[in-house]
Amino acid sequence: MFTLGFLSKEFGKEVFFSTYTLHMLPITLAIMITSGLVWYLFYKVEINSLPKAKEFFDQELEKLGPMSMGEKLNLSLFILTFTIAMFRPAFAKLLPWFDTTAIFVTMAFFSWIIPVKTENGHWETINNWNTTVKNMTWDVVFVTGAGIALASIIEQTKAYVLLVNLLTPLIQMGGLATTFGFGLAANIMTQFMNNTTTDAILLPIAAKTLKQFGLNPIPLIYLTSASAALGYALPAASGGITVAIGMGADPKVMLKWGTILSVVGLITIIIFGMFLTSVWPYFATT
C-alpha cells in the first residue's frame, strides 16, 4: 500500500490497485518458481514422513468446527474489498474520492459496525476494541510509523545524498547496475526492518535520483519495492519470521536459508525485471 500511495503522490495521479497488481504479479510468480526450485533441489528435509499427519489435521479441523457467522462475514468483506479495489478503474471518474485507501478504510469500518451473534449468544461487532488490543501487532504499527517519519527526515535534511553518492557510479552505468544497486540496498535493509519502512526510505531516493539523471524511475520503483519484500532472514524483517521462530523454527536455519532465498529472489528480480522493462512497455508506466 505504501508503494501504491507513493506512486500516486509522486506522479500526481491515482495509481490503481489493479495496476500495481499487474506490475508485481509476474515478478512474484518468477520468485516463487526460482525460490521453489532452489528449495526443492538443495534443501534437505529432516523428516521424510509424518505418520498420522492426516489424522492430526482432521482432529484440528474438527476442533475448529464450521465457520461462524462472524468468520463468514469477515471473509466476505475481504473478498468484497479486493474485488472493489481491482475494479476501481471502472468507477474512478464517477467516484474520484473513493480511491484504494478509501476502499480499504471503508471496508475496515464496516467490520466495526456489523453485529454478529457469538457462540455464547451475545451480540458484538465483527471487530471490536478488545479483540484489536489482544491481536494487533502493535510493534509493526509503531515501527512502520517510525520508518515513514525517518524517511521524511532523511529527505528533508538531504541525508539521502550520502546513499546517492554511493550509488552514483551504478546509476551512471544505468540499467542492470542501477537495479542491482537499489535492489541490494533494499534487500539488506529489509532484513533489519519491515518492507514498508524500507520502501519509505528508498523509494523517494530512487525516484528523486533517477529524475535528476533524466531517467524514468517507474520500473526501478517497482523493482526496489519487490526487493524490499525479500525479508526472509531475521525476525525483524517480518511478522511471519517472528511467528515461525516463536513456533519452534531453528533461527540458524532461518538465517541460512532466508539469506540464500533472499539472494535468489534478488537475482530473479534483477534479471526478470530488466527483461520485463525491455519487452513490456506497460511495466514502465503507471
Image (spheres, grey):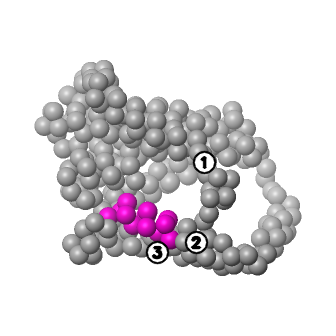
Which residues make up the magenta segment?
99-110
Q: Amino acid at mark 3?
A: Leu
Q: Kindly tell me whether residue 125 is visible in this rendering.
A: yes
277 and 145: which is toward the camera: 145
Tag of residue 80: 3
Q: Amino acid at mark 2?
A: Asn
Q: Is residue 38 left or right of residue 24?
A: right
> In the image, what residue occupies the spot 67% across and 46% down?
243
Circle 2 sits on which residue? 74
- The percent position of residue 17, horizontal first and vertical second, equals 35, 62
Q: Identity of the amino acid at label 1?
A: Thr
Which quadrant holds the C terminus?
bottom left
Using the image, determine if residue 118 lies above or below residue 180.
below
Q: Earlier in the sequence, mark 1 or mark 3?
A: 3
Apparent side of residue 184 relative to residue 260 in the rendered image (left or right):
left
Predominant secondary structure, magenta span: helix
Q: Residue 168, percent across and down?
A: 24, 24
Q: Is residue 282 above or below residue 212?
A: below
Q: Is residue 215 left or right of residue 230?
A: left
Magenta run includes residue 141: no
Residue plotted at (60% across, 48% down): 137
Dot 2 or dot 3: first in sequence order is 2
Q: CA distance from mark 1 to mark 2?
A: 19 Å
| Disc 2: CA contacts within 10 A as few (<14), some (14-19) or many (>=20) | some
Instruction: Look at 29% across and 30% down and name the residue there.
Output: 155
Which residue in the structure is indicated by mark 1? 137
**Left or right: residue 276 compared with residue 1:** left
**In the figure, residue 197 lies in which quadrant?**
top left
User: Of marks 1 and 2, which one's residue comes earlier in the chain?
Assistant: 2
